[in-house]
Amino acid sequence: MRLLDFLVLLLGWTIMSTATAAPFAIIIHGGAGTITRDKLTENKAREIRQTLARAVNAGYQVLEQGGRAEDAVTAAIVVMEDSPLFNAGKGAVFTADGRHELDASLMRGQDLQAGAVAAVRHTRNPILAAQAVMEHSPHVMLAGDGADQFAREQGLEQVENSWFDTPYRKAQWQKARQTASQSLSEELLDDAGLHKDDKFGTVGAVALDQHGHLAAGTSTGGMTNKHYGRVGDSPIIGAGTYADDRSCAVSATGHGEFFIRYTVAHDICARVRYRKESLEQAAEQVIMQALKAVHGEGGIIALDKQGKLVAVFNTAGMYRGWRTSQQAAAVTGIYEAGDER
Ligand code: ASP
């Protein structure tokens, strides 16, 4: 296996602050992978861009009205969880035993409060469960039945596990099972034609609100045909999600085992905070250098307190979108750097 040409997108857009209003911004992702033009019909690409724009705008509206960064993050993520296009909520991938187990986390930069759920099976919007853990429990992470039960007690909608099914993800799982006989080995996934592109699809959002606070959140079904009980990087604070007003906020997508071992989201923020690297430099070092060297595929979105937006990925594409208080409309991208419009 070899990584495709590495693509990096360093937006480097800083929001120009105006005399009257504090700057605000939101950036989202819908997963990274071998997302190339031959893999998506024009209609599908259009549908994805429209949904990304809808998610960006849902979060933007919260910020525009003076709302909190964490509420903007959850508003954007709920749109993507409810869409069957992404591997989060409805449309989540199948586990090896034919079910869905969902992971999510949320963190706010103001006070480093965080909440996460792992391997939930019945909570319709796992990101809202993560927020409830953060706001209404003394814990940071709840897993499995206990997480679903807590979400239910918090009044969050519960669904049958089959509610998350979609025909596409089922076919993907059946193919993976037939050919890979339940294994996630790279060679077998290659043979099955299921390498890279079908493994990812996590969603995430990062926001800066008018009060100058950052937040980040991530939600996923994990990886196709994963062992039940497997927990990826998305619900792990410091791996898939991190937010600290003193440095930056990050949401990741990619091969979770690498993102856990390299504590990707925290490493980027730590570089900014301690080494005084710019957000671009820090993201570039971690995604394009450290992860690339070990074939850890994926990408991140990030924001710093100045409103600098960054999207960096070492895969062919990453679903992404953003909007700052200086933009009249959301921008979305799917493929290589420069594809945003
Ligand atoms: N990071 C996720 C996981 O490993 C997968 C993804 O980003 O699509 O669970």
Image (cartoon, rainbow, N blue to C red):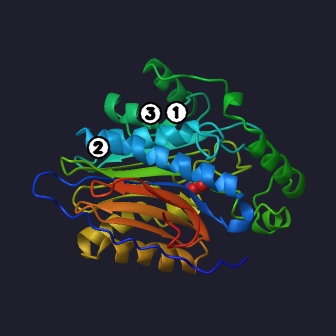
Location of residue 266 by image quarter: bottom left
Give SS at disc 2. Answer: helix
Location of residue 297 by image quarter: bottom right
Give SS at disc 3. Answer: helix
Give SS at disc 1. Answer: loop
Q: Mark on residue 128?
A: 3
**In the displayed structure, would residue 114 be above or below residue 23?**
above
Q: Tell me where residue 7 appears, x and y as whole percent.
A: 54, 77
Q: Tell me where residue 66 appears, x and y as whole percent.
A: 22, 40
Left or right: residue 93 compared with residue 339: right
Ligand 1 quarter of the rendering:
bottom right
* Mark 1 vs mark 2: in front: 2
Which mark sits nearer the N-terminus, 1 or 2?
Answer: 2
In space, the residues marked 1 and 3 are separated at their CA atoms by 6 Å
Q: Tell me where residue 305 appears, x and y as whole percent.
A: 23, 60
Which residue in the structure is indicated by mark 2?
A: 63
User: Which amino acid type is marked by label 2?
Assistant: Leu
User: Which amino acid type is marked by label 1?
Assistant: Asn
